[in-house]
Amino acid sequence: MFKRFIHYYKNHKLILTLDMLAAFLIAVTGIGYPIITRIMLNTWIPANDLNMIIVGGAILVGIYIIRMGLRYFVQYYGHIMGVHMQGEMRSDLFDKLQTLPYSYFDNHETGIIMSTMTNDLFDVSELAHHGPENLFIASFTAIGAFTYLMFIDWVLGLILLGVIPILFFLTWFFRRKFRNAMRRSKKAIAGINARLESSISGIRVTKAFTNESIEKERFEKANDDYISARTEVFSSMGKYFAVSQFVTDFFNVLILVVGGIFLYKGIGDFNYGDYSAFIVSVSLFINPINQLIMFMEQFESASAGFVRFINLLDEKSETIYNGNKQCEQVSGDIRFDHVSFHYEESNEVLDDVSFHLEKGKTLALVGPSGGGKTTICHLIPRFYFLEEGHIYIDDIDIGDYTLRSLREKIGIVQQDVFLFGGTIKDNIVYGKPDATDEEIIEAAKKANILDFINTLPHGLDTEIGERGVRLSGGQKQRLSIARLFLKNPPILILDEATSALDNTTEMLIQKSLQELAKGRTCLVVAHRLSTIKNADEIAVISKGKIMEKGSHDDLLKLNGIYADLYRLQFKNSDEEFTAKIDIS
C-alpha cells in the first residue's frame, strides 16, 4: 500500500525535494528565537549593549522574512503538487472505470464511486502534500528544540522528555477506535452521495408520484448515519486532544516549578536567561510533538480513502478476458453454441441456448420478461463473460477478439436511450468522433430527425440538457439511431427500441430502423409482435431456453407460445388470426 502511494510522487521529485528543503529550513530557523532570547538576557542586556540588542532583533526579523518566503513556497507549491497527484489518481481511476465490466456497475452505486473520485482523493492529496512536510518540519523542530534544551539544562530536558511516551501511549490507546470511526464516516458520506445522486436523477419520478416525503426520509437516514459516524470521530478526537493537552499543560507547569526551584536554590549555573530561554523553548519542543500526533487524524482519514481508491483500482478489469485477434472484415454470421449463463448471486438466466443467425438475416427474440432476451443481446458484445458454451462471429469465438474491435462491429439501440449532456451534434458524432458535418447531416437525415433539427434556432448546436431532458422519447431514439448510422456496424442489436413509444412515433422510428437494418445482421428484441412479423426467424425465449423457433407464419401454425402471445395482442382481430392459423 505504501509503495503504491509513493508511486505518485515520481513525477514530482523536484517539487518534493524543494518542499522538503524549505521545510527543513523552516524547522532550523525556528530555533533562532530562543537562542537570541537567551543571549540577549544573559549577555547583551546585562552589558547594556543597545546596538547588539537592536542587531539581535533585526536578525530575528530577517529570519522571519525568510521563513515567510519558505512558508509561501511550502503552502503554494506543496498544494500544487498535491493537486497534480490528485489529478493523476483521478485519471487512473477514470481509466479503470472504463475497463470495468457491466457486472461491476450492476452492484455498485454511482454516488459511491463519485465519492471515491472526489472526497476520498481530496483527503489523499492533502496527505500527499502535508504528510511529508509536517513530518519533516515537526521532526526537525522537535529534535532541534530538545537538543538546545539539553544544552541549557540536561535535567530539565530529561524531565520534559517524559511527556513523549505518555502522549504516544494516548495516541495508541485512541487510534483504533478513531480509525474505525473514520472509515465508517467515509462510508457514510459515500452513502449520502449515492442517495443524493439517485434522488436528483429521479426527481421527475419523485414529483410525478408526489413522493418527496419518502425521498426526504431516505436522505435523512443516510444523513443521520453520517452524523452518527462523525459524532463518533469527534468523540474520539475530543477525548484524545483533551487528555493529551492536559498532559502537555501539566509538563509545562512541572518545568515552570522545577526551573523556579533551580533558580531559588541556585543549582548549577542556571540563571534567569537560561530559565526564560527554556520556558520559551518548551513550546518549540512540545508543539511539534503534538503536531506529529495530530497528524494521526489526517493520516487515518486519507488512508481510509486511499484503501477505497486502491480497492477500486484492483477490481478485475474486463481487459483480463481480452483476446488478441482484431475483428476486422466481419460479415456478421452469429452462432450460439450451448450457452449457459447466470448473473452473480442469481439463478440461471440462460440454459443451454444454441442458435444460428446467418449474415444479413434478422432474428427476433420474443417471450416473457426475465426470460433471457436482453442477456443474449449483452453477451454478443461481451458485456458479460461466458462460463459455459461459446459464441461465434464468422466462426471465430468472440473471446478471441479484442473487446474494442469486437464492439466496433456491433451497434445497439435500446429502449432506455442514454444521451450525454451537450449538443445534438455532440451526441450524433459520438458514433464517429471524426465525422464531417456532411456525414452528420446525412446520418440525421437517415434517422428522420433532420427536419426537427432544422426547426431549432441553433440547429445541431442546440443544447439538449442532462440525459437529453429537453427532447421527447422519439427524438432521443432517433438521435441514438443517427449515431449508429455514423458508426455503420455490420451487426445490429435492437433491444425493445420502440416499446416505450406511441404508435405514431413508433412508425417513424420503424422506418429509421428498417433503413438502418439494410444489409446488416440484426438481432431484435420486441414485445410488440407487429414489429417483427417480417423477421427471417423468430425465437421464443422463456426461462432461459428457446422454446420455439421459426418464421411468423410457421409459429402461428404451431399454435404454441408464440400463437398465444399473438392472440393476446391481437384479440380484437380474430379473423386475421384465424386466417393465419389456417395457412397451409
Image (cartoon, grey):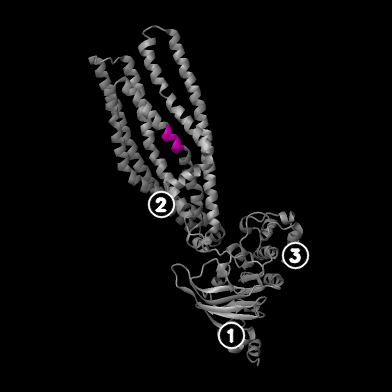
Residue 225: assigned label: 2
Q: Residues within 10 Å of mark 3 (few under 14, many from 20)?
A: some
Residue linked to disc 3:
445
Secondary-structure class at tag 3: helix
- Mark 2 vs mark 3: give the one in front: 3
Task: Point out the residue furthest to the top here.
Answer: 48
Magenta: main secondary structure equals: helix
Residue 378 in sight: no
Residue drawn at (50%, 22%) of the image: 65
Task: Point out the residue furthest to the front here.
Answer: 324
Residue 52 in the image: x percent, y percent? Answer: 44, 10
Q: Is residue 303 above or below residue 48?
A: below
Residue 247 in sight: yes
Q: Which residues are magenta?
A: 130-136
Spatial separation of the CA atoms under disc 3 and disc 1: 37 Å
Q: Is residue 267 magenta?
A: no
Residue 133 lies in quadrant: top left
Secondary-structure class at tag 1: helix
Q: Who comes first in sequence, dot 3 or dot 1?
A: 3
- Mark 1 vs mark 2: give the one in front: 1
Residue 552 versus residue 430: which sits nearer the camera? 430
Residue 99 versus residue 479: which sits nearer the camera? 99
Q: Who comes first in sequence, dot 1 or dot 2?
A: 2
Residue linked to disc 1:
563
Q: Amino acid at mark 1?
A: Ala
